[in-house]
């Protein structure tokens, strides 16, 4: 059993930016040489999240609308008053969605549906530099210890 930790560095455009990171995770999995196990995808920071959905323009706008309905951005939250901040909504959306996802893999391939992408959700109101940790835990051969 091996543990391999990698990092993705991404620039986001700010509020509501949804970035498909599936191909980069698969590429890092191939580079690791691991065949069977799972990968934890974790975004560092309290105003972004990791999720999965069918990455197409309709759903992208549906999701943005859903977040807006659940946690409106044009409201003043206690956090904003505490810190003189404006991103209370960003923290709340991130807390709801969660910062990580675990994806299993077999034969060096992520087990995802054809219409199931892994997506970084940027909830902050301004562009950010994001670090995403990919921690692979697995074995080279299915029978190796
Ligand atoms: Zn804040």
Image (cartoon, grey):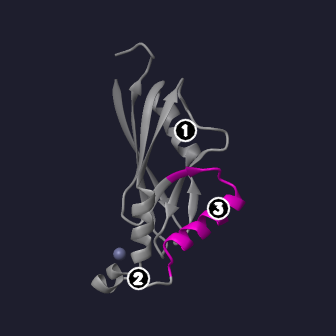
Q: Quadrant of residue 66?
A: bottom right
Q: Is mark 2 within 8 Å of ligand 1?
A: yes
Q: Is residue 61 magenta?
A: yes
**How many numbered marks have been drawn onto this rendered protein structure?**
3
Residue 39, given in percent of the width and then of the height, sits at 43, 37
Q: Is residue 142 left or right of residue 52?
A: left
SS under mark 2: loop
Q: Is mark 1 within 8 Å of ligand 1?
A: no
- Position of residue 143 relative to residue 30, above or below, is above
Could you give the CA–CA distance between mark 1 and mark 2, rounded to whole angstroms?
36 Å
Q: Which range of residues does the magenta coloring cover?
A: 51-73
- Going from N to C along the chain, the mark reached first, 1 or 3, is 1
- Position of residue 142 relative to residue 117, above or below, is above
- Going from N to C along the chain, the mark reached first, 1 or 2, is 1
Residue 96, given in percent of the width and then of the height, sits at 43, 61
- Going from N to C along the chain, the mark reached first, 2 or 3, is 3
Residue 40, given in percent of the width and then of the height, sits at 41, 42
Can you say which quadrant of the picture contains the N terminus? top left
Q: Which residue is mark 1?
A: 26
Q: Which mark is residue 109?
A: none
Name the chief secondary structure element in magenta. Answer: helix
Q: Quadrant of residue 43?
A: bottom left
Say which of marks 1 and 3 sits in front.
3
Q: Quadrant of residue 46?
A: bottom left
């Amino acid at each position: 059993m091996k543990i391999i930790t990698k990092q993705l560095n991404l620039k986001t455009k700010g509020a509501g930016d949804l970035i498909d990171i599936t191909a980069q995770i698969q590429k890092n999995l191939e580079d690791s040489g691991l065949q069977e196990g799972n990968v934890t995808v974790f975004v560092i920071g309290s105003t972004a999240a990791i999720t999965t959905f069918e990455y197409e323009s309709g759903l992208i706008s549906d999701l943005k609308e859903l977040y807006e309905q659940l946690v409106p951005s044009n409201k003043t939250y206690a956090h904003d008053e505490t810190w003189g901040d404006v991103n209370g909504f960003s923290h709340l959306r991130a807390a709801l969605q969660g910062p990580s996802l675990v994806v299993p893999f077999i034969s060096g391939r992520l087990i995802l549906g054809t219409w199931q992408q892994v997506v970084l959700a940027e909830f902050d109101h301004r562009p950010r530099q994001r670090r995403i940790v990919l921690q692979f835990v697995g074995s080279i051969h299915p029978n190796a210890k």
